Amino acid sequence: MNKKKQLGFAIVGMGSISQFHAKSIQSLKRGRLVALCSRSGAKVRAAAEEYGVDWTTDLEKILQREDIDVVNICTASGMHLEPALAAARAGKHVMVEKPLDVTLERADEMIAACEKAGVKLACIFQTRFNPDFIKLKAAVDAGKLGKPVTGSAYIKWFRPQSYYDANDWRGTLRGDGGAALINQSIHTIDLLQCIMGPVQTVFGKTATRTHSIEGEDIGLAILQFSSGALGLIEGSTAIVPGYPERLEIHGEKGTIVLEGGRIKNWDIKGEESNIKNNNGSGTGAADPLAIPLTGHMRQIDDMIDAILEDRPPKIDGHEGRKALQIVLAIYESAKTGREVRLS
């Protein structure tokens, strides 16, 4: 077991999500934010002044520091691999914002490199640490819903054109890997597969209806899970004004619905519903910065535990890969017009 009581963190990339990493690390007793790195000197300098830490535009300077144990990567999605490989070679543990990267080949290269170097790799899917989702999963794992019937993920969000225009990578195939599905909807898609189990086949359609972007602003898919259950995905950034994401899980004995991160329906045969609050816990439906900080805090804390206890993080590279594979299968199906079987 690692005897260090506090781990040093560096953040690479100053995208909007980086503030959640920085504030989460600084709120944890066992984590210390040491330095920030970005190609944009002005942006990283301003952030470093806000958090009272060192900064650099040279990744190698970050990786040479002995007081940095973990590198959190918050660059554009299509630029996750290179800093992850460099960090692994330097013996640093790696946390990567979702998705791991924009292709399975790049994701697999990252996973392999971290395993070869003997460092931990975690992919940020902070909504899995939501208490109500944990309660939902525990009920399903305990068999309270019985045989799975269907599971659906609805992410009817909104982003204005200005959101995409603010960064040259958003909504592009190279930088974002797509748009609404791989960036916004992937969180709820991850929750869906985590509950329903492996996906066997996907048939999808995508379109770009209201934005001037290369990727899609709406995507639909029909899923068949390995259990035989069926599923639906509807993900969009074109739904005005934007509604809380919704996860519906139906089994032969009942239904549990999660909306905006909170359990909205708990209808199980023989059980009385005890829902106390269904107002939601914060959602990115219309504002990407409206999500709560607690999810990132819990996942980063889990990474600290994983390092100190020498165990895999709860969402390691292999877990992080699953939702990416589903999204990419939807894209392939939409492109070919054919059902796609996942290997």
Image: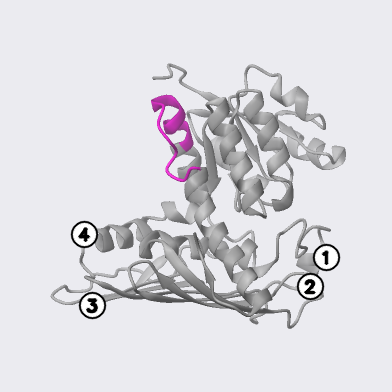
Mark 1 nearby-residue class (10 Å; few <14, some 14–19, many ≥20): few
Which residue is painted at 43% across and 36% down in the image?
Answer: 312
Secondary structure of the residue carrying tag 2 is helix
Which residue is painted at 27% across and 57% down in the image?
Answer: 138
Gap between marks 2 and 1 measured at Cα: 6 Å
Q: Pointer 3: what residue?
A: 252
Q: Earlier in the sequence, mark 4 or mark 3?
A: 4
Kind of residue sitting beneath label 3: Glu
Secondary structure of the residue carrying tag 3 is loop
Q: Nearer the viewer, residue 126 or 82?
A: 82
Q: Pointer 2: what residue?
A: 161
Residue 41 lies within the magenta run: no
Circle on res. 142: 4
Kind of residue sitting beneath label 2: Gln
Q: Earlier in the sequence, mark 2 or mark 3?
A: 2
Q: Are marks 1 and 3 in contact (CB under 8 Å)?
A: no
Q: Earlier in the sequence, mark 2 or mark 4?
A: 4
- Left or right: 251, with 83 as reference point: left
Gap between marks 1 and 3 measured at Cα: 46 Å
Q: Earlier in the sequence, mark 4 or mark 1?
A: 4
Q: Is residue 21 visible?
A: no
- Please identify, in this view, whether the residue under mark 2 or under mark 3 is nearer the observer: 3
Residue 307 lies within the magenta run: yes
Q: Pointer 1: what residue?
A: 165
User: Where is residue 163 drawn, in percent x and y?
Assistant: 76, 66
Kind of residue sitting beneath label 4: Ala
Q: Earlier in the sequence, mark 1 or mark 3?
A: 1
- Left or right: 112, with 262 as reference point: right
